[in-house]
Amino acid sequence: MLLPEVKRSWQPKDRLPVIWVEALSCTGDTISFENSLNPGSWEILTELIDLRYHYMLMAASGNDAMDVMYDVANSEQGRFILIVEGAVPIGDKERFTIVGTKRGIAGFETPDELLTAYDAISYLGRRARHVMAVGSCATWGGPSAAYPNPAGCVGVQKALPKRRVINVPGCPAHADWMVGTLAHLVLYGEPEIDAYGRPTDFFGQTIHNLCTRRQHFENGIFARKLGDPGCYYRLGCKGPVTFADCPIRRWNNTSNWPVEDNTPCIGCTAPGFPDEMEPFFHHLPDIKLPNITTTATAVAKAVAAVTAAGIGTHLAVTWGSGHLAKTIKRGLPLRQKPPRAGLTGKISNVLRSQKSLWYPDSNGKWDR
Ligand code: SF4
Ligand code: SF4
C-alpha cells in the first residue's frame, strides 16, 4: 500500500543508516516489520534504509556486533535513525536488560562493562537524527510496564525527556505504521504527530470512527457474546478511545481486522495500554467523547428501554466512574493505575510459590 509513494520519492542518497535497539520486548515488532509486504522487507532493507545494527537481523554477534553499533554512532552521528523496540527498565540501576558492552564508549577502562538498554538509548539517542519508538512497550511501557512493573519500565520518551521521540504504538505495531513512518523520516523528515508523538497519518482517527460496524453502534445493535454480529461496545470494545486506522488498513495482508473477526478492540495503541484498557471485556463509561455523536446509552434508550437498563446496570458495577472516565473527561494523559488493595499480597504469594527471585513484601515494597 505504501510502495508507490515510496518509489516515487526515493533517491539512493536518501538511504539513511539505522540502528535498531531491542530493549525489554517480545520481538513482536521486529516480526511485524519483517512481514511488511508492500514494500516488502527485502526492498526496505536494500533500497530504503541501511539497517546497520539489529541484534536479530545482522550476521555479526558479540563484540563484532557492538563494534558496528559504535562505528555507526560515531561515523554517522547526526545522520542515523535510532529505532527502539521494547520498554526501557529504569528500576534497580537499569540492570534488567543488558544489550551489550560499553567497549565503544570512551572513558571506560574496562571494555566489557555492561551496557544496559537505558545506557544504549541514552548514548545513541543523543547522537541520532531521529528517534523512533516502535510498539506499545517502547512508546508507553506497554505490557512490560503493566502492574506491578517490578523492572520500573517506561517508554522511550520518558527515558529521553529532552529528545523528540516519534511514537509508533501497537501490540505489535502494524508493519505499514513502522515502514510508513520510517519512509517519511528518510524522505521528508518528521511527520505530523499528535500530542502523544504518534504520526497522524496512521493515528489521526479513532477505530470507532472508521469501524465497519459503526452503523450497528448508531442503530443500537450490540453483540451479546463474542462471535455475534453487531457492535462490540458492550463486550468491552475500546475503539471509541483508541486512535489507529486498523479498520481501513487491516492486518495480515489486509485479510481482516479484530472487530470484523468478532473480537473487541482492546486499545493496544492507546497510552497506558494494557492497564488503562483493562478489563478488556467490560465496556467504557457512557460519556460524550470527541468525534462521537452519541453514546451507547443514548442509542439504546431510543431503540429499546431494556437495552438502556442493561447498560445502566453495567455502568453501576464496572469502571464507569473510575480512573479512565475521569482522565478522559478531563482530557488528561492516561496514567498507570495505583496498586489495587489486596492484590499485592496475592501476587506475592504466587511469586513465592513459583520461587521467583522478586516479590513484594507485606508493605508492597519489591525486594529479593
Ligand atoms: S464500539 Fe467498537 S465495534 Fe462498536 S462501532 Fe465502535 S469500534 Fe466498532
Ligand atoms: S483493533 Fe485495536 S487492539 Fe486491535 S490492533 Fe487495532 S488498535 Fe490494537
Image (spheres, helix red, strand yellow):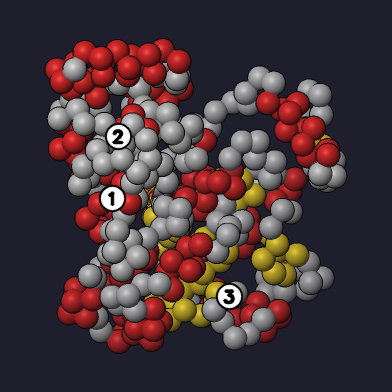
Tell me the crowding category of disc 2: few under 14, some 14 to 19, or many 20 or more residues within 10 angstroms, Cα based: some
Q: Nearer the viewer, residue 134 or 247?
A: 247
The residue under label 3 is: 56
Say if residue 265 shows up in the picture.
no
Where residue 14 appears, x then y in whole percent? 31, 80
**Label 1 to label 3: alpha-carbon separation:** 33 Å
Q: Could you tell me which residue is drawn at 63 percent across and 26 percent down?
A: 339
Does the residue at mark 1 contact the one at mark 3 (Cβ under 8 Å)?
no
Mark 1 vs mark 3: in front: 1
The residue under label 2 is: 223
Say if residue 110 shows up in the picture.
yes
Q: Could you tell me which residue is drawn at 42 percent across and 52 percent down?
A: 170
Q: Quadrant of the N terminus?
A: bottom left
- Label 3's element? loop
Is ligand 1 less than 8 Å from the beta carbon at label 2? yes
Mark 2 vs mark 1: in front: 2
**Label 2 to label 1: alpha-carbon separation:** 12 Å
The residue under label 1 is: 260
Say which amino acid is labelled 2: Ala
Q: Taking 250 as reference, is 71 above or below it?
A: below
- Label 1's element? helix
Does the residue at mark 2 contact the one at mark 1 (Cβ under 8 Å)?
no
Q: Position of 21 compared to 327: left or right?
A: right
Q: Taking 282 as reference, is 367 above or below it?
A: below
